[in-house]
Amino acid sequence: MEKKELSKEERSYKERQKEEITGNLIKESGQFTLAGNPYHHRIHLLNIVGEIEGHECLPPNTKTTKYEHVLPILAEIEDNAQVDGMLVLLNTVGGDVEAGLAIAEMISSIQKPVVTLVLGGGHSIGVPLAVSGDYSFIVPTATMVVHPIRMNGMVIGVKQNYEYIERMQDRIIDFTVRHSSIEEARLRKIMMNNEQLVKDIGSMLVGSEAVKEGLIDAVGGVHEAMEYLHQMIERNKKE
């Protein structure tokens, strides 16, 4: 049976439809598939920006990344044989701890090459997100604020609450240590630093400082991140 060729009008309609779908993906959740490279690799671009929104909706004027958008997309990337790898762009102030850690766990479990790139900032729960890929980059001017868990609203000061916060903090530390080169003792030390931030405890690491501490693998921009990802995909295909 011969394959029917599309008319000029039908091709034009399908192209417009594809552009509309792509435009909506970028507008709603910062998603895009890169496929025009000379390697012919299909790379999914995941954009994590603003504040990580959890179970409660943030004000409409707040720039957010919604975890209910990101989790299904990550599952689709893992299951899609046409996707060769993923590039994660990060510029986040942090946000909901449970939601951020859930996203980080899913990214780390994807069995395809994943590279993360910190642009602007990777603060708070953005730290485990930044280290969740197979290799991480940070631009020279980007910052990472490493600090203990903050609790919003009224907190009842009882033993059980303190134990809950401590166990959640341990989960974040354990994930970060397992997916980076920093030692646990060093991470706890810079996290509990009380000499650097004016109104909080913790540390701010800029570009190469994050690499020196072992949190991030290398300093670089989108070119370095893309080239490294292409190399990982090529090695993955050969293996």
Image (cartoon, rainbow, N blue to C red):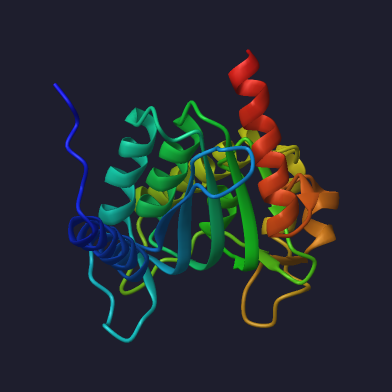
Looking at the image, the residue that sits furthest to the left is: 1
Q: Quick one: 210 or 24, which is closer to the camera?
A: 24
Q: Residue at x 78, y 45 (%)?
A: 214
Q: Is residue 187 above or below residue 51?
A: above
Q: Nearer the viewer, residue 58 or 234?
A: 234
**Location of the C terminus (image quadrant):** top right
Q: Residue at x 46, y 40 (%)?
A: 107
Q: Say whether residue 152 is visible.
A: yes
Q: In the visual, does 106 lie left or right of 223? A: left
Any part of residue 188 in sight: no
Q: Nearer the viewer, residue 146 or 83?
A: 83
Q: Quadrant where the N terminus lies? A: top left
Q: Is 228 on the left-hand or right-hand side of 219? A: left
Q: Report which quarter residue 24 is drawn in.
A: bottom left
Most extreme residue toward the top, as rendered?
239
- Residue placed at 37% from the left, 71% from the top? 64
Coordinates of residue 76 in the picture (x, y in percent)? 31, 37
Residue 68: x, y in percent?
A: 25, 54
**Quarter of the rendering containing residue 39:** top right
Asked which quadrant contains residue 15, the reply is bottom left
